[in-house]
DNA sequence: CCTGGTGTTCCGTGTGACGGAACGTTATTC
DNA sequence: GAATAACGTTCCGTCACACGGAACACCAGG
């Protein structure tokens, strides 16, 4: 366990999370480190090109090299790679915003998306995390998850206060999701989302696809179209993924 | 200069670049490090969640946490943020594949893109680098670059053998690019690309937008439409960016 | 059964990361 | 405008800890 490495990454995380450039001393107090230590580590990161310092204010920001590093990882990710053509197909079939996601802890992590050309939009960007039970894709994956209960309980605990969740009710809902083969979520009241799991090895979900559309342009027919599109695209993608 | 930090990042770079999981010993020989050192650093990275080890083969791969780290950086990037609506506008106007990019050393770095729904496509993904003079967007930016000559010479040197470049000819071409306000590239013979610079502070380019279309569906009228769309979108984006 | 490869563990050595204190500048305060 | 505060930076003595060499356990293939 190299302490310096651990700290360097903590610093880089802090710097890249922030939307504005960060002061050295605020990092030092946040991470409870000595200023001189933070300074040395930031200099090391700067020498490698991962952070840069604003000449006028002295504050630090993460550079795009940090992004390039991660970008390479995503582009080799099997689910993201396999999803590309199916995302496009799903987008073509429905004309709405479509996303691929995978489980990451108790959250879904959005890997990629194609946004609807139409005006209405909402705000899950690639790279963002959302608690799995709050999303249609997450529910579709949880329905295949053996210890869904544990996840639901942890999330319910975590979101206590901002959002009340009835674990038993949600478990029952997952049962119907499993029956029907898709999940529907009205997390955002103006948007209806429909998600399907991409079956991977061992009956678990390798990932999920979802379609999100504004409620006002989603009548029963449109909804049926989306559901069917999600189901066939998910099963076809699972076949492709299994062949790799 | 923390040596361990330097090495940890070198290792993470090596692991995330690779498309297949990497052997510990291959990293050790590549970076000329002791196996025990690599092992310790990989354990540290694994403990932080940036790499994981395949249980069966023992090989290492980068995790999506590495991607999340960089993903946050991109989403706070001023050019990428400002570009989003203009990318969409340009896509709507032309119906073709559109990209935003910035200069990164002697290369352009693609930040984002919207792909054409039509079948033809080609292969610059977000996060990839291409030598600036080879792209329309890069040429548009080089036209505003005081030391374009130095960049052209370095790139010509770097690409010697794979691709011959006449620096004087290209400098003259940049002159016409500056006159006309856009650049055109036929780097890929089947595709025509038209790029425009987004004017930033000090007369330099903050970034560039480009449109790429298959040659067979690009007649003179279409081309004129694209050129005009690129020009107005770039100037409008520059105004927006300047107001921040 | 041996050889060559893997990833892993152990450990003595010495270097380089560490934190505290002092520094020079730049904002902020009264 | 002096005083104060907060910033990033530099210096330095101390000792933890990163280091690399060697030995380990394991799995292939010959």
Image (cartoon, coloured by chain):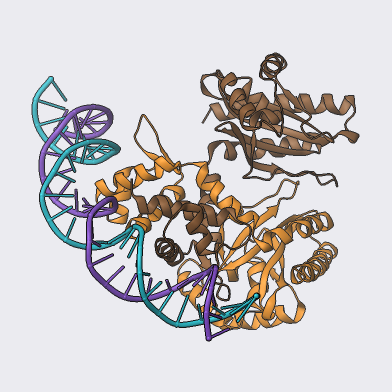
Chain colours: A orange, B brown, C purple, D cyan
Q: Is residue B236 above or below residue A79?
A: above
**Residue A173 location, x and y as percent?**
66, 80
- Say left or right for B169 vs A27: right
**Residue A140 location, x and y as percent?**
68, 73
Q: Is residue B151 above or below residue A135?
A: above
**Which residue sits at x=51%, y=53%?**
B30
- Say left or right for B127 vs A25: right
Snapshot quadrant of residue A193: bottom right
In this rendering, does residue A11 appear at all? no
Image quarter (top left, top right, bottom left or bottom right) of the C terminus of chain A? bottom right
**Residue A42 location, x and y as percent?**
35, 45
Snapshot quadrant of residue A58: top left
**Which residue sits at x=61%, y=83%?**
A146
* Total numbered circles: 0
- Say left or right for B231 vs A5: right
Closer to us: A207 or B52: B52
Image quarter (top left, top right, bottom left or bottom right) of the N terminus of chain A? bottom left
**Residue A19 location, x and y as percent?**
46, 45
Q: Is residue A103 above or below residue B160?
A: below
- Say left or right for B151 vs D6: right
In this rendering, does residue B38 appear at all? yes
Closer to us: A230 or D19: D19
């Amino acid at each position: 366990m190299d302490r310096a490495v651990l700290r360097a990454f903590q610093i880089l995380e802090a710097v890249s999370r922030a939307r504005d450039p960060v002061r050295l001393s605020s990092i030092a107090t946040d991470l409870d480190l000595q200023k001189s230590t933070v300074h040395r580590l930031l200099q090391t990161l700067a020498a490698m090109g991962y952070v840069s310092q604003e000449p006028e204010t002295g504050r630090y920001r993460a550079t795009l090299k940090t992004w390039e590093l991660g970008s390479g990882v995503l582009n080799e990710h099997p689910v993201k790679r396999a999803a590309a053509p199916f995302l496009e197909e799903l987008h073509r079939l429905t004309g709405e915003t479509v996303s691929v996601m995978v489980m990451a802890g108790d959250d879904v992590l959005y890997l990629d998306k194609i946004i609807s050309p139409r005006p209405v939009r909402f705000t899950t960007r690639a790279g963002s995390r959302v608690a799995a039970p709050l999303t249609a894709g997450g529910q579709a994956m949880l329905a295949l998850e053996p210890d869904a209960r544990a996840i639901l309980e942890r999330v319910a605990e975590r979101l206590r206060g901002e959002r009340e969740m009835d674990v038993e009710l949600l478990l029952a809902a997952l049962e119907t999701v499993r029956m029907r083969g898709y999940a529907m979520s009205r997390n955002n009241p103006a948007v209806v989302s429909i998600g399907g799991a991409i079956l991977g090895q061992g009956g678990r979900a390798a990932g999920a696809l979802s379609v999100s559309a504004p409620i006002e342009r989603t009548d029963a027919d449109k909804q049926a179209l989306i559901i069917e599109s999600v189901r066939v695209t998910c099963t076809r993608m699972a076949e492709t993924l299994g062949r790799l």
